[in-house]
Amino acid sequence: MSYEGSFRVWRGDDDAGGLVDYQVEVNDGEVVLDVIHRLQATQAPDLAVRWNCKAGKCGSCSAEVNGRPRLLCMTRMSTFSPDEVVTVTPLRTFPVLRDLVTDVSFNYEKAREIPAFEPPKGVAPGDYRMAQVDVGRSQEFRKCIECFLCQDVCHVIRDHEQNKPAFAGPRFFIRIAELDMHPLDTREGRAEAAQDEHGLGLCNITKCCTEVCPEGIKITDNGIIPMKERVVDRKYDPLVWLGSKIFRRQT
Amino acid sequence: MTSTVPASGVAAPGRARIGQGTLRSDRWWLQPLLVFLGLTAFVVYGLVRTASQSYYFVPAYQYLSPFASPCVSASCVPGSSHLGVWFGTFPPMIPLAIVTLPLLLGFRLSCYYYRKAYYRSFWLSPPACAVPEPRAGYTGETRFPLIVQNVHRYFFSFALLISALNTYDAVKAFQSPSGFGFGLGNVIMVVNVALLWGYTLGCHSCRHITAGRINHFSRHPVRYWLWQRVSWLSARHMQFAWITLGTLVLTDAYIALVSAGVIDDLRFVG
Ligand code: SF4
Ligand code: SF4
Ligand code: FES
Ligand code: FES
């Protein structure tokens, strides 16, 4: 089946812009990115859109479809009825460069602020040995494709530009969780830093990050909440604090 | 919507100029509305029932409502004080289970799931994903009072004790004037208690205590096994949170109706 679909696509740059109406052919089995490409090929050759893999694995094509943060290449046209107007805009938490392309460098800056994996002294890469059950939790977070949809939807920065300096965002909370839960990471103080330097306390666990993650990572349940509990151990729970002074805890 | 979007958010300089706070076209307001109505209904029911100080006990079968357990006031009807009488008579409106209710309220209020539920539906922070919240300022859980949410694990310890008490009440209720007895009220109480355990043990603080806090599951097989069970419950914590609100009301309402003589308990034995 093939039909003429109605689209509204945001066109513009950081100075000005707006939604522009288009009629574009839609065929069976297509995704929104296919339609955007057809639009580029037939009516709007200068339309800017970022993409690479068309397989939901590179995290490049993040945008918002009908107001929801989505990967353009993983949003099937069959989820819309043929008479529905489909609205496509760039991510609304980051500065726009042009059309559907935003400047996501905020996320790379935040990534650099997190200290890297620190293996035990004398253990060289290639000599890491660990049990699968011990590393399983960290591996869930390695599925992240860095699409930054979770960063885009998070109201802490989406609705409050002023929080950006203090808040690393859900993608980096699971990076911290990955390292803090890692059986071979030896760095101390990751939980304290999550709270004091990366803004974990700003998260109010309303779970929008989990709702939008295309990899299905349980960002809140498996990453943020366990980190909040670890922060309580180190900072707010007098009994655990006392216990850790008296006994040397085995982890 | 446009006028309510603070300029600190999606209308901030540099971001794509769209004019509308959200372009979501689905009924995003439905879920926060239902949660608001559901939680409000439960709180109103609980307030009315506990303030009424009445119809919380069926002496013949020892059915005691979870909203009145433990009944520790001299105002409690004879036989309902399973843990003894600790206080004198209470003035009207004071809940008879004054010892446990504030702890249970604290447990549910600081629960990670209910936090999500009321931050979204009562405080609109955010009302739904990618829908702007109405206020320009936001400090999350970094300051008083919300930083106090971090004491959730202490409420969890109390909730364990209270679940044990509810279990005791449910077991004690297998009675009739002639000895052992068993009726529909028992079925309701047992189901309620089982689900309350499901809710309590699925707590994220419980998950953390069992093994979430350690990094080498392989060195702690028993804790790891417990963690896996708790993780199963914890993944369904929202469902347990809602179902137990329902079963609490059902248990209390059933006991109230039997106690008031509106209906007779359906007896299977005794
Ligand atoms: S759960 Fe926390 S990190 Fe995730 S979107 Fe909500 S506020 Fe942001
Ligand atoms: S956690 Fe999920 S939503 Fe966030 S960047 Fe990674 S893949 Fe994308
Ligand atoms: S193009 Fe790679 S994720 Fe969509
Ligand atoms: S009871 Fe819900 S997280 Fe603890």
Image (cartoon, coloured by chain):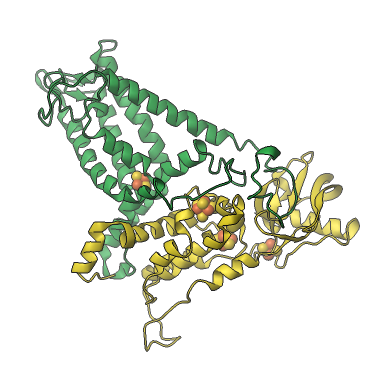
Chain colours: A yellow, B green
Residue B65 on image: x %, y %: 24, 25
Quarter of the image where one finds residue A185: bottom left
Q: Residue at x 37, y 44 (%)?
A: B111
- Which image quarter: residue A55? bottom right
Q: Is residue A31 something one can see in this rendering?
A: no
Count every numbered label the image shows and give the total: 0
Taking A127 as reference, is B169 above or below it?
above
Query: Residue B247 is drawn in which quadrant?
Result: top left
Q: Is residue A122 above or below residue A239?
A: below
Indicate left or right for A197 with A112 as reference: left
Of residues A67 and A113, which is closer to you in this image? A113
Residue furthest to the top: B262
Measured from the top left, where is residue B145 in percent x and y? 39, 45
Q: Residue furthest right?
A: A43
**If the image is split into quadrants, where does the C terminus of chain A sit?**
bottom left
Residue B92 seen: yes
Instruction: Tell me residue A79's x, y (percent).
Output: 69, 45
Q: Position of residue A29 (x, y in %)?
A: 74, 52
Image: B73 above or below B151: above
Residue visible at 82% across and 45% down? A5
Q: In the picture provided, is A231 more to the left or to the right than B38? A: left
Instruction: Compare residues B253 and A116 and report the one nearer the observer.
Output: A116
The answer to whether residue A226 is above or below residue B238 is: below
Front residue of A135/B177: it is: A135
